Image (tube, rainbow, N blue to C red):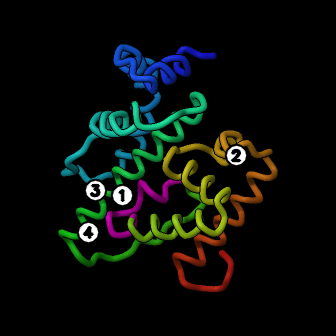
Amino acid sequence: MSDVTRLLEAAQAGDEQAANRLLPLVYDELRKLAAAKMAAESSGHTLDATGLVHEAYLRLVGNQQFEGCGHFYAAAAEAMRRILIDMARHKSRQKRGGSLQRVDLDSGDLVTLAGPDEMLIIDEAIQKLVTEDPVAGRLVQLRYFAGLSVEEAGELAGLSRSTAYEHWAFARAWLYRALHGTAEGP
């Protein structure tokens, strides 16, 4: 059992010292993940990568049970996704309109290239995909919001490489249809 896993268990049991010792161990990895997500944000953004890490960390520690490091990082990516989606919703309420930008679904930059309005549309499509096919939806979330490759996302989801790519191909086609409103393939 790794130090991170032990500290996660202790923090979940209410040990505040464990929570304080956990952050330095996971901070660098969370900071890299957050920096990648914030790189494409506008310069006037009210949240920076450090703020995103801290907000996500506060939402995680003590609120959930984790099955290990991989589960913790996946939950952190999901928390960051929710924070960015909440901010996009807030911006969208303040500003209506804007033009949609065409983005390659295989680029892995779908979320970082999207503006607030597009991010809401993408999130809605992903949530529908999760309802229809939870495995494919999970791969998309890990790929776009955690910045993982198809292989890494598949491994975290407990899938073989070939099965991960099958789910990924389905997810890409499904999202293409959902985002472009067409029955044709990509």
Taking 111 as reference, is 120 above or below it?
A: below
Is 150 in the magenta?
A: no
Residue at screen point 64% across, 69% down? 132
For the residues bearing labels 4 and 1, Cβ distance under 8 angstroms: no
Question: For the magenta stretch, what is the residue range?
Answer: 108-119
At mark 3, the secondary structure is helix
The kind of residue on which mark 1 rests is Ile
- Quarter occupied by the N terminus: top right
Q: Position of residue 32 (x, y in %)?
A: 43, 33
Please tell me how many numbered marks the rendered image carries.
4
- On the image, numbered disc 4 is attached to which residue? 92
The crowding category of the residue bearing disc 3, from other C-alpha atoms within 10 Å (few below 14, some 14 to 19, many at least 20), is some
Q: Earlier in the sequence, mark 2 or mark 4?
A: 4
Q: Nearer the viewer, residue 68 or 162?
A: 68
Q: What's the distance in space between the residues labelled 2 and 4, CA to CA?
A: 33 Å
Q: Is residue 74 above or below residue 110?
A: above
Mark 3 vs mark 2: which is more N-terminal?
3
The residue that disc 1 covers is 85
Residue 90 coordinates in the image, percent (x, y): 24, 62
Badge 2: how crowded within 10 Å, few (<14), some, or many (20+)? many
Q: Earlier in the sequence, mark 4 or mark 3?
A: 3
Q: Amino acid at mark 4?
A: Ser
Residue to which mark 3 is pinned: 87
Identify the disc placed on residue 154: 2
Q: Position of residue 156 (x, y in %)?
A: 66, 40
Contact between marks 1 and 2 (CB within 8 A): the answer is no
- Crowding at dot 1, Cα within 10 Å, few <14 / some 14-19 / many 20+, comes out as some
